[in-house]
Image (spheres, rainbow, N blue to C red):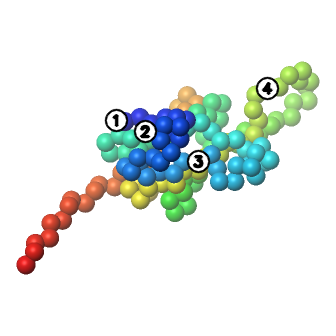
Amino acid sequence: MSYISLRNLGSLNPTPPRYLRFQVGENSQSDNLSQQNIKPMPIDLSEQEKQYRVKANLPGFSREEINISLDEHLLVIEAKKQTKSDEQNRYLQSERYQGSYQRRINLSEQCDLSKISAELSNGVLTIDLPKIAEAPLKKIKID
């Protein structure tokens, strides 16, 4: 299994390796999202023999607060923490983030989009993206 930390990917090599063929970004409209109080979530992307794996840290989020959608080859991960009004307490300091996270990943055509699976465990969302088996190289006989 090879492991690629996306935090360092841009600084090490501006172009991802050819086998990766993923486009992972904060968000194309990051200025607009920051005005809406939406932050990019930290993720890691790794490659295994038969699949790619995306891991996103979402501590404190329940399954009901996380939405994963797929449109064509665009995987969108969203998590929203609603601010609850607490009339019994007057907060002197509130540092925990109450808002939304979002991450968009353009998937490679090498992924089997019909078999994507996701799991949330201990605040870590894991999304498995199975690879499509490569067709064997066809030899053409010259007449």
Query: Which of pointers 1 and 3 lies earlier in the amino acid sequence?
Result: 1
Alpha-carbon distance for marks 2 and 1?
Answer: 7 Å
Under circle 2, the secondary element is strand
Task: Give me the C-alpha separation between circle 1 and circle 3.
Answer: 23 Å
Residue annotated with mark 2: 46
Q: Amino acid at mark 4?
A: Glu
Q: Which residue is mark 3?
A: 25
**Which residue is tagged 4?**
95
- Within 10 Å of the Cα at label 1, are there few (<14), some (14-19), or many (20+) other Cα atoms? few
Quadrant assignment, res 99: top right
Residue at the location (35% across, 40% down)?
A: 48
- Mark nearest the camera among 2 and 4 is 2
- Quadrant position of residue 50: top left
- Quadrant housing the C terminus: bottom left
Q: Is residue 79 visible?
A: no
- Whichever of labels 2 and 1 marks the residue nearer the N terminus, that label is 1
Q: Between tags 2 and 3, which lies in front?
A: 3
Left or right of 51 in this view: 98: right
Q: Relative to the observer, which residue lies in front, 55 or 10?
A: 10
Q: Is 135 displayed left or right of 46 in the figure?
A: left
Q: Amino acid at mark 1?
A: Met
**Amino acid type of disc 3?**
Gly
Q: Between label 1 and label 3, give the one nearer the viewer.
A: 3
**10 Å crowding of disc 2: few (<14), some (14-19), many (20+):** some
Element carrying mark 3: strand
Q: Quadrant of the N terminus?
A: top left
Disc 4 or 3, which lies upstream in sequence?
Answer: 3
Which of the labelled discs sits on residue 108, or is there none?
none
Q: Are marks 2 and 1 in contact (CB under 8 Å)?
A: yes
